């Protein structure tokens, strides 16, 4: 095969911004120009020699770019894509969702030559050849024309249709869907469909405002590239989808809306957040092969938790369980309801420990399993923890938090190897001891300005020049 680009490849893409899997799209081979890393994705200019189009590679191609399989000035064959508008501009950019390498870097950029002669192209239908055949029957005379070949060549669309008909129902359904990667979505785009795994599900919550009472819950969705987005459902949509959404399952979702994410409340790394209403479509992708990760963690080492104290940002941690307390009940002030709570202490390779409080069902279910196996020092990976300032630094689960025991992930294997070979005999210290962090939100921790009574009594000049404000933690011994 000649190492060259497809003629008018960019025009083909522009004419088919969202190609359907059942439609025939000619081969699209383009040259990669100006390849560079932008954020955590690689961008480039797709060129067919005549035209160029800004484009972005899928995240699963990053390893091939790093190893040199995909090179600047090289050729790639685009197998699937989505064409998006750039907000507030007349330009478009290409989201490549599937491609393959055709050639490494060429010596020069391919440019179309200027044609000096006109060539008329006449499209002709294929001729069917016939042969004359005489029927030697006494009561029939004349000539009967029959096709020389009974097998007629089929179009690509016909072949695809026949292949789809022979597939299993679940595979046939997956083939007919046009799935968009989460990274390609924006508020200006409509008519999209995503295939995602539910990696986090919050509890149903009630609220009251000037317009009345209502209910709401949130979920976190992850696609095959590992991109995440938060989706929110209110009232009718919340009641419709709360039972349908099951943690860990994969769904096709469409007819939702997107808006710019509120940075103060967002829980995933995405510029947008999604809202699903009662008209949104959610279908489980059952019995389909998928490579979407179960849960995506962004682990924070225990010794780096200080800046998150009393902030809005939630954290994920992984650690070795050092001890687990029995479950206790805490009475909630609002309604005097008893809420189950269980504390455990975890440590990591930084040789720091932190207290993690499991609440509600996590305290009873996962907490009990950890309590029964505490002597085996299990590894726990916990997602979406609130960082508080109890005992300096402490962690608490929320309704959307999830706990995995001995997860099959590289970080857990590395931590287990460290703990068995070195960590078990190491001296551990609480992260809260002597720590004076500044919160990421600028809020002051309750122990930031704490001093001891000895510090005050041993410095009689304190307060002479200006009033001294500080915090004390004390135990009352005698009341007069």
Image: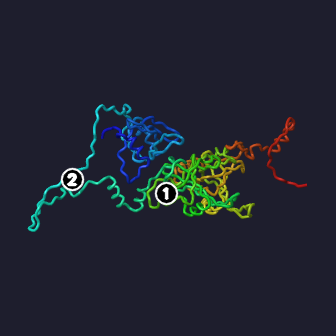
Q: Give the alpha-carbon distance from disc 2 to disc 1, as whole Å.
A: 45 Å
Give the quarter of the figure containing the C terminus: bottom right
Question: Taking 116 as reference, is 254 above or below it?
Answer: below
- In the image, 13 versus 181, the foreground residue is 13
Towards the viewer: 317 or 344: 317
Percent coordinates x, y for residue 150 in the rendering:
21, 58
Q: Residues within 10 Å of mark 2 (few under 14, many from 20)?
A: few
Work out which residue is located at the far right of the displayed protein and give it: 480
Residue at the front extreme, as displayed:
142
Residue 379 visible in image: no
> Quadrant of the image for the N terminus?
top left
- Contact check, label 2 and label 1, Cβ < 8 Å: no
Residue on which the image places disc 2: 128
Q: Which residue is mark 1?
A: 252
Q: Inspect this view and state whether residue 114 appears.
A: yes
Closest to the observer, 55 or 296? 55
Residue 79 screen position, x and y as percent: 39, 47
Viewer-nearest residue: 267 or 134: 134
- Residue 288 percent location from the top left of the image: 44, 59
Q: Secondary structure at mark 2?
A: loop
Helix, strand or loop at disc 1?
Answer: strand
Residue at (35, 34) in percent of width and height = 112
Circle 1 packing at 10 Å, graded few (<14), some (14-19), many (20+), is some
Q: How is the image coloured?
A: rainbow
């Amino acid at each position: 095969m000649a190492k060259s680009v497809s003629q008018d490849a960019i025009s083909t893409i522009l004419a088919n911004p969202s190609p359907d899997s059942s439609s025939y799209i000619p081969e699209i081979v383009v040259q990669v120009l100006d390849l560079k890393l932008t954020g955590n994705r690689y961008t480039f200019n797709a060129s067919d020699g005549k035209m160029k189009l800004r484009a972005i590679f899928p995240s699963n191609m990053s390893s091939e770019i790093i190893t040199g399989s995909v090179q600047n000035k090289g050729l790639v064959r685009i197998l699937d894509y989505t064409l998006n508008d750039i907000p507030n501009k007349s330009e478009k950019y290409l989201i490549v969702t599937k491609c393959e390498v055709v050639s490494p870097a060429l010596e020069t950029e391919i440019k179309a030559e200027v044609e000096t002669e006109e060539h008329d192209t006449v499209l002709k239908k294929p001729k069917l050849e016939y042969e004359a055949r005489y029927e030697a029957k006494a009561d029939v005379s004349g000539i009967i024309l029959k096709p020389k070949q009974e097998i007629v060549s089929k179009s690509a669309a016909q072949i695809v249709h026949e292949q789809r008909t022979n597939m299993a129902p679940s595979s046939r359904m997956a083939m007919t869907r046009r799935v968009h990667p989460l990274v390609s979505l924006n508020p200006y785009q409509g008519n999209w469909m995503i295939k995602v795994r539910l990696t986090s599900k919050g509890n149903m919550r009630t609220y009251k405002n000037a317009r009345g009472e209502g209910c709401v819950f949130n979920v976190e969705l992850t696609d095959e590239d590992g991109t995440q987005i938060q989706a929110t459902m209110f009232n009718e949509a919340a009641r419709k989808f709360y039972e349908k959404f099951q943690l860990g399952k994969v769904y096709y979702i469409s007819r939702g809306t997107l808006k710019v994410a509120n940075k103060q409340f967002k829980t995933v790394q995405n510029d947008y957040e999604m809202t699903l209403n009662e008209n949104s479509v959610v279908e489980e992708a059952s019995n389909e092969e998928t490579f979407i990760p179960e849960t995506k963690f962004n682990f924070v080492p225990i010794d780096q938790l200080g800046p998150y104290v009393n902030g809005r940002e939630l954290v994920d941690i992984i650690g070795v369980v050092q001890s687990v307390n029995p479950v206790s009940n805490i009475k909630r002030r609002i309604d005097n309801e008893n809420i189950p709570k269980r504390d455990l202490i975890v440590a990591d390779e930084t040789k720091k420990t932190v207290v993690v409080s499991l609440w509600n069902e996590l305290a009873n279910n996962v907490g009990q399993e950890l309590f029964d196996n505490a002597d085996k020092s299990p590894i726990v990976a916990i997602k979406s923890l609130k960082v508080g300032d109890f005992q300096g630094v402490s962690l608490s689960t929320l309704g959307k938090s999830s706990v995995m025991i001995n997860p099959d992930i590289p970080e857990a294997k590395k931590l287990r190897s460290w703990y068995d070979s070195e960590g078990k005999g190491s001296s551990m210290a609480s992260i809260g001891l002597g720590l004076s962090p500044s919160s990421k939100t600028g809020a002051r921790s309750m122990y930031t300005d704490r001093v001891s009574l000895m510090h005050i009594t041993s410095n009689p000049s304190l307060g002479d020049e200006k009033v001294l404000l500080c915090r004390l933690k004390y135990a009352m011994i005698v009341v007069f």
